[in-house]
Image: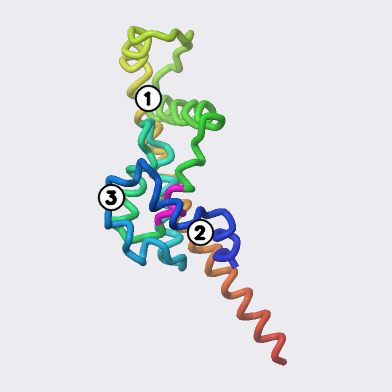
């Protein structure tokens, strides 16, 4: 069942509650619905985490946490799913988002040479920014929807499989 599989990878709720960056939510973290793992909370959290994973901002975890609290879905799963984009995967994922954005806009992909300067950042935002941000938005929505409905389908399939196995065992 997905529940057992997911629980193996989730952090303990005390670890999440004591996280420094999540202290801004205060007592909101004490809602028990944020810690339950069922089909509704898991699919919502997984979809949220994937949605915010494609946002090119440094505080994805906080955004995902705030949305999980508002929507009352599993908080640790929402936070853990955001980490699909990490320092190792981020270049490939954001390059893919840029490809999607430039394809949708019909613009030519521009080559660039990285410089560690604010001037380069602002010039890049002007030249490649629209395609990159549109690609991030499209990938964010698509990944969130696929994650939401995909986890729901996997969860239902595994529950049905378990029921069939239990039914055949009794015969």
Residue 151 — which label? 2
Q: Nearer the viewer, mark 3 or mark 1?
A: 3
Q: Most prominent secondary structure in the magenta stretch?
A: helix
Q: Is residue 125 left or right of residue 9?
A: left
The residue lying at 35 percent from left, 49 percent from top is 65
Q: Nearer the viewer, mark 2 or mark 3?
A: 3
Q: Quadrant of residue 68?
A: bottom left
Q: Which of the image's four quarters has the C terminus?
A: bottom right
> Mark 1 highlights which residue?
131
The residue lying at 49 percent from left, 56 percent from top is 12
Q: Nearer the viewer, mark 2 or mark 1?
A: 2
Mark 2 and mark 1 lie on one chain; the one further toward the N terminus is 1
Please state the extent of the stretch shown in magenta in the rendering.
75-79
Mark 3 and mark 1 lie on one chain; the one further toward the N terminus is 3
Q: Are marks 2 and 1 in contact (CB under 8 Å)?
A: no
> Mark 3 highlights which residue?
25
Q: Residue furthest bottom?
A: 171
């Amino acid at each position: 069942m997905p529940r057992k599989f997911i629980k193996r990878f989730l952090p303990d709720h005390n670890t999440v509650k004591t996280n420094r960056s999540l202290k801004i939510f205060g007592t909101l973290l004490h809602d028990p619905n944020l810690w339950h793992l069922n089909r509704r909370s898991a699919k919502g959290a997984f979809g949220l985490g994937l949605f915010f994973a494609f946002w090119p901002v440094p505080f994805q975890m906080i955004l995902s946490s705030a949305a999980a609290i508002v929507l009352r879905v599993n908080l640790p799963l929402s936070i853990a799913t955001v980490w699909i984009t990490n320092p190792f995967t981020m270049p490939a994922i954001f390059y893919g988002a840029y490809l999607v954005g430039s394809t949708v806009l019909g613009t030519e992909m521009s080559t660039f040479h990285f410089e560690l300067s604010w001037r380069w950042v602002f010039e890049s935002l002007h030249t490649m920014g629209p395609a990159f941000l549109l690609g991030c938005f499209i990938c964010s929505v698509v990944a969130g929807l696929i994650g939401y409905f995909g986890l729901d389908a996997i969860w239902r399939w595994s529950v049905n499989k378990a029921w069939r196995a239990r039914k055949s065992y009794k015969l």
